[in-house]
Amino acid sequence: MLMKSMMIAIGLGGLCVHHAYAQEQADTTLNRTVVVENQYNPEVMDAFKINVLPEVEEPAVPEQHIDYATSLHPFSAWKFTPMQAMTSDEKQQKAPGGYARVAYGTRNNVDARLSYLWDISRRDCLSFDASFYGMNGKVSSSLPDADDWGSRFYRTDVSLDYRHGFRKVSLGMGGAFASQVFNYMPVESEGGEEAFVPGRQRYTSGEGYFRLASVEGALPVDFSFQAGLQRFSRAHDIPYLRHGSENIVHTLGFVSGAVNEEQKVGIGFAMDNLIHDAGQADYTLLRLNPYYTFDNGRMRLRAGIHADAQFGHDGKLMVSPDVKLDFFFADTYRVYVHATGGTELNGFRRLNELSPYWAQAGQMQASYTPVDLKAGLKGAPVPGLSFHLYGGYRIVKDEIFKGCPFVMDEDSPYAYVPFMQEKAKVGYGGAEFACQYKDWIDMTLKGVYSHWDVKEGMEALLYLKPEFALDASVRAKVYDDLWVKAQCRFEKRVGMKAMEDAESVNNLSLSAGYGFFNRLNVFAGVNNLLNCGYLTETGYPVQGFNVRAGVSVRF
C-alpha cells in the first residue's frame, strides 16, 4: 500500500459551469411545502453529503399523492431525481413552515437540523436554517502499518435570509456562517513524531449578500442582481500552502425581456474577485451568458454562449456554447440535444466541498469546459413509470483529480488528499428508471458508464474517477404510516495498468420509520451494512458498519 501511495504521489507530482441565476418565485405555500418537506428530509445523510432540492425534470410523471417527509435524496453525486407529483392546493395550504430533526448513532454520529420559514407579513418573509452533523470514532486506516484512525469531523451551518416584496420589485438580504473542525489521518500511531503542521484543523466560512429582483411580468424587463462578500479561512497552515484565507467579492444576476409570447432574449452574468493572503495570487473571473429562447409548447430552443474571461493569474478568454434543443411529443415524451460548457471557479469553498482533507502543490486554475455534448430521451409511458436514456462527450481543461492520501511534507506525519489538474476527455452514457405506485412503493435505478482519457503518462490521475456507477433505491409502505427503505451504490473505479486499482465503492443501507399525526416521524437506519472498506469521494476511508436513529417533526 505504501508503494502504491508513492507511485500515485510521483504520478501526481508530474503534473464554472456558468452560475446561472434564476429569478426567485413568489413565496407560496407550494414553494414552502417543497422546501420544508423535500430539502429537510428526516433520514440521516452520510457525513460530507449535501441536501439539495431535486431538479425539476420534464416530462412530469402523472399527478399522484406525495408521501411527505420520508424520501431521502439518494446519493448526492447524482443530479437526476424523479419529479415528485404535487397534491391539491387545498392540502398545500396546511403546509407548516418549521422543521426540526435530531439523530444519533454509533461512532458518535450526530445529525441535527432546524429550519423555519416565517411570513412576517404579506410582503415580508424571513427564513432561518441551522444544522450540525459529524462523527467521532475509530475508522480503519487506509495506510499501511497504521493503527485505526481516531476520526473526528463536525460541521455547523447557520443561515438567515430576509425578503421584502414591493409592488414591482423585491429586496432581499442575508448571510451564512459555517464552522468545520476535523483531524487528519496520521501515517503512524498517535504519540509519534512531533508535527510542524497540527493534526487538527478548523475551517470557517461566511458570507453576506444583498439582492434586488423584479416581480416577473411587472416590468418591461425581468432582472435580478445580487452582490456580497464571501470568506474562507483555515486555522492552521498546510504543506505547500502555508497561508489559507480567501475573500471573494461575489456578484451575479441576469436581465431578460420578452420579444413575444414565445421568444425571449437575455443575458446572465457573474463576477468573482478573489483576494488571497501571501499564499495565492489575486485574480478576477468574469462570466457572461447572452442567450435567446423560443418555446411554443412542442419545441424548446435555447441559443447562447458562455463568454468567460479571467484577469490575473494566467488570464485568458474562455468561450463555449450554450445551446439546448428539446422536442416534446405524445404529451409525456421528450427528446433533446444539448451542447453546453462554461467555467467552474476552483476557490477554497469548492475544494472543501470536494474533500475537506485537500492539499495542493500550486494555485488551482478555473476548470474550463469547451464543450459538453449530450443527447437523450425522457418519457413517462404509463402513470407512475418514467425513464431517461442519455449519452454524451465532454472535454474539460484543468479538471480536478484526487489521489489517495499521502504525506506531502516531511515536517508533517499526516496524510493529505492531493489535488492536481490536467485536461480530461470523457465519453459517457447512462439510463435511469423510476417506478411509483401510489404511496405504497417507490423504486429508482440509475446507471452510468464513463470512459476517461488523459494525456499519456498521466493515467495515475484517474485513480478515484468512476468508470461505472450503479444506484438503486426501493422504498415501500409496509402498513399505514410504517415505511422501510433499502439503498445500494456500487461504483467501479477506473482500472490502473501500472498499479493496483482503487477499491470499488459498495455501500448497502437499510432504514425504516413510522409517522405520527402527520407531523412526527421516528426513524432508524443501518449504513454500510456489508462493512466494506474503500476510499470515499473525499479520498479518505469510509466508516465501517454504523447505526443511527432519530426523530423529526414539522411545526
Image (tube, helix red, strand yellow):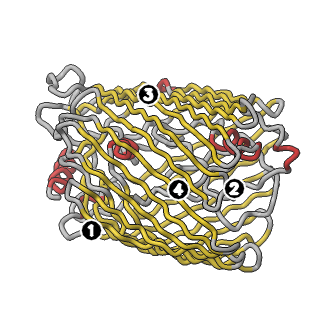
Residue at the image position 67 percent from the left and 66 percent from the top: 58
- The spot of residue 113 in percent (x, y) is 59, 29
C-beta proximity under 8 Å, tags 1 and 4: no
Q: Which amino acid does label 1 sit on?
A: Val
Give left or right: position of 240 versus 179: left
- Estimate how packed mark 4 is, as few (under 14), some (14 to 19) or many (20 or more) residues with alpha carbons within 10 Å: few
Disc 1: which residue: 454
Secondary structure found at label 1: loop
Q: Which residue is outermost to the right?
A: 90
Which of these two is toward me, 139 or 423? 423
Q: Which amino acid does label 4 sit on?
A: Trp
Q: What residue type is labelled 3?
A: Tyr
| Separation of residues labelled 1 and 3 (CA atoms) | 36 Å
What mark, if any, has residue 154 been given in the picture?
Answer: 3
| Separation of residues labelled 1 and 4 (CA atoms) | 23 Å
- Estimate how packed mark 2 is, as few (under 14), some (14 to 19) or many (20 or more) residues with alpha carbons within 10 Å: few
